Image (cartoon, helix red, strand yellow):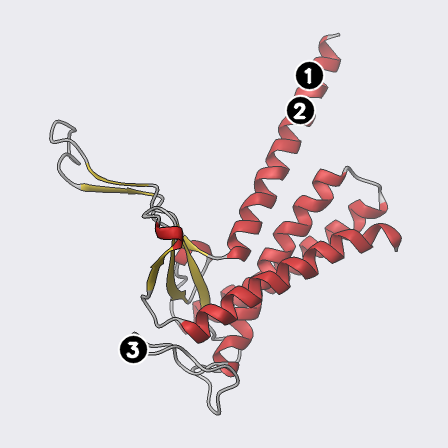
Amino acid sequence: MKDLKKPLLLIIIILIIDQAIKIYIKTHFAIGDDVKVFGLDWFRIHFLENKGMAFGVNFGDKGGKILLTFLRIILSSLIFIYMYKIIKKKERKIIIYSFALIFAGAIGNIIDSVFYGVIFNESTIFAPATLFASKGYAPLFFGRVVDMFYFPLIDTILPEWIPIWGGENFRFFNAIFNFADACICVGVFMLLISILMTNKNNMETKSV
């Protein structure tokens, strides 16, 4: 279908970028390596891996891990089916591309979870991993998601006069994430904006 080509192209481009970044980080960074981008304190590449959800959130032990992976696959399939339906219905582009971003981001992290344990050896605090190593670090479906983007925009000590947290370190934004996570967030944000705009237009139409 002609209308499906552009969303599919966007998905493919996102996956290529996401996997290229992750493969580079895995093969050039040891766990915990931290590099300031352009010398900026608030923009860093900090290599971590996580077993669970976006932004380093974990989801239980091995059973939770494989459940999460299969849930991701099922939800991603449903998202793609829905995206295909709204393309056929000639839905607005902002809605279509929102779902394309969310789908691509989800697939990007699924690739890590399913295949990275098999195609990479273990990343350590001492050395980067090797791609297509003779022995992987985990079975199929038990790979870890690669995270690297770190934006501690505010890193300060809170004033003593603030109740409870006074004198403690405050850091914003403290999550470490990847390109796929960012695409999911942008897609969700675009979707929310579209829904809000639609609701606003409907309210204005009713009031006329």
Give me the residue at 29% from left, 77% from top: 126
Q: Residue furthest front?
A: 38
SS of the residue at dot 2?
helix
> Label 3: few (<14), some or many (≥20) within 10 Å?
few
Q: Amino acid at mark 3?
A: Phe
Look at the picture and state if 116 lies above or below 89: below
The span from disc 2 to disc 3 (Cα, nearest Å) is 53 Å
Q: Are marks 2 and 1 in contact (CB under 8 Å)?
A: yes
Give me the residue at 48% from left, 81% from top: 120
The span from disc 2 to disc 1 (Cα, nearest Å) is 6 Å
Q: Looking at the image, tell me whether mark 3 or mark 1 is earlier in sequence order.
A: 3
Q: Nearer the viewer, mark 2 or mark 3?
A: 3
Residue 131 numbered mark, or none:
none
Q: Position of residue 115 (x, y in %)?
A: 55, 76
Asked if residue 4 lies left or right of residue 167, the reply is right
Query: Which quadrant would residue 46 be assigned to in this image?
Result: bottom left
> Label 1: few (<14), some or many (≥20) within 10 Å?
few
SS of the residue at dot 3?
loop
Residue carrying label 2: 199
Give me the residue at 47% from left, 75% from top: 142
Q: Is residue 154 something one can see in this rendering?
A: yes
Q: Amino acid at mark 2?
A: Asn
Q: Position of residue 166 (x, y in %)?
A: 14, 34
Q: Amino acid at mark 1?
A: Met
Q: Is residue 71 something one can see in this rendering?
A: no
Query: Which quadrant would residue 1 be assigned to in this image?
Result: bottom right
Q: Nearer the viewer, mark 3 or mark 1?
A: 3
Give me the residue at 33% from left, 77% from top: 124
Residue 126 numbered mark, or none:
3
Query: Which quadrant would residue 90 be assigned to in this image?
Result: top right
Q: Are marks 3 and 1 in contact (CB under 8 Å)?
A: no
Residue carrying label 1: 203
